[in-house]
Amino acid sequence: MKKIVLITGASRGIGAATALLAAAEGYAVGINYRENRAAAETITDTIRQRGGEAMAIRADVSSENEVKSMFEQLDREFGPLTALVNNAGIVGELMPLAAMTADRIRHMFDVNVLGSMLCAREAVRRMSTRSGGTGGVIVNVSSGAAKSGAPFEYIDYAASKGAIDTFTMGLAKEVAAEGIRVNAVRPGFIDTEIHAPGRLDRMVNLVPMGRAGTAAEVAEAILWLLSDKSSYTSGAFIDILGGR
């Protein structure tokens, strides 16, 4: 059966690394992006040059209509979805809760929580054996911040990732009998553009391993959860925190 994965927020960072590794593992890859079309097309072109299948799809995951359209485009291009990686997410300027506006907090949850739930909903509708699908896998990208709370920096982001953890556990139980496994990874200090300037250098001394992680290291964990090697794993979390 053809392996087809949709990766949200895949134009850079963890999403891009996951897209490249998934393609190397034989997946046809849907590369979702919201703004950076050039970066998404670079990843798509790289995969195609290596003999793989990929397509870039623009969609704001916080928009229900755009999410539906994204899945429909993937259906037409590649066929029935077999895997979803909910990676799209945002952070805001570092500040304590007392300084945050309602609009900032609302936008954080719209993208990080609502977006993941909408994408998972569309994936379940396609993959569920009760709906005529053949099963599949969902991997949610949470964060070590869900455990630390990220005080004084982005407590709203941490709270949104805590919601993703709860969602992962609930959905895993809800669709286990429908042939769908749901798991999550919790990356820590990973060397990507999501961090505020200088933050990674400032925080890395808190990591027992003494260094930041790489996007490729997170991608390896995601691909294991997508693979048959984790066939009895659902509702689980892999912490990629350098021992923290």
Image (spheres, rainbow, N blue to C red):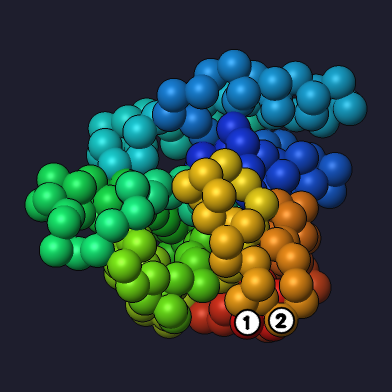
Label 1 sits on residue: 244
Asked if one can make out residue 206 in the rendered structure from this viewpoint, the answer is yes
Which circle marks residue 115 in the picture?
Answer: none
Q: Is residue 29 left or right of residue 152?
A: right
Label 2 sits on residue: 208
Give whichever of 244, 217 is nearer the camera.
244
Give whichever of 131, 108 is nearer the camera.
108
At mark 1, the secondary structure is: loop
Q: Is residue 111 left or right of residue 86?
A: left
| Quadrant of the frame with the C terminus | bottom right
At label 1, which amino acid type do we have? Arg
Q: How crowded is mark 1: few (under 14 residues within 10 Å), some or many (20 or more)?
A: few
At label 2, which amino acid type do we have? Pro
To which quarter of the image does residue 34 belong? top left
Residue at (35, 33) in percent of width and height: 60
Q: Distance between the residues labelled 1 and 2?
A: 6 Å
Give whichever of 73, 168 is nearer the camera.
168
Q: Where is residue 178 in the image (x, y as percent from the top left)?
A: 49, 71
Q: In this view, does 61 lie to the left or right of 74?
A: left
Compared to residue 180, the image places residue 66 above or below, namely above
Q: Where is residue 49 in the image (x, y as percent from the top left)?
A: 86, 21
Q: Residues within 10 Å of mark 2 (few under 14, many from 20)?
A: few
Q: Earlier in the sequence, mark 1 or mark 2?
A: 2
Asked if one can make out residue 27 in the rendered structure from this viewpoint, the answer is no
At mark 2, the secondary structure is: loop
Compared to residue 13, the image places residue 233 above or below, namely below
Residue at (38, 50) in percent of width and height: 91
Mark 1 touching mark 2, by CB under 8 A? yes
In this view, which residue lies farthest toward the left? 102
Q: Where is residue 33 in the image (x, y as percent from the top left)?
A: 49, 31
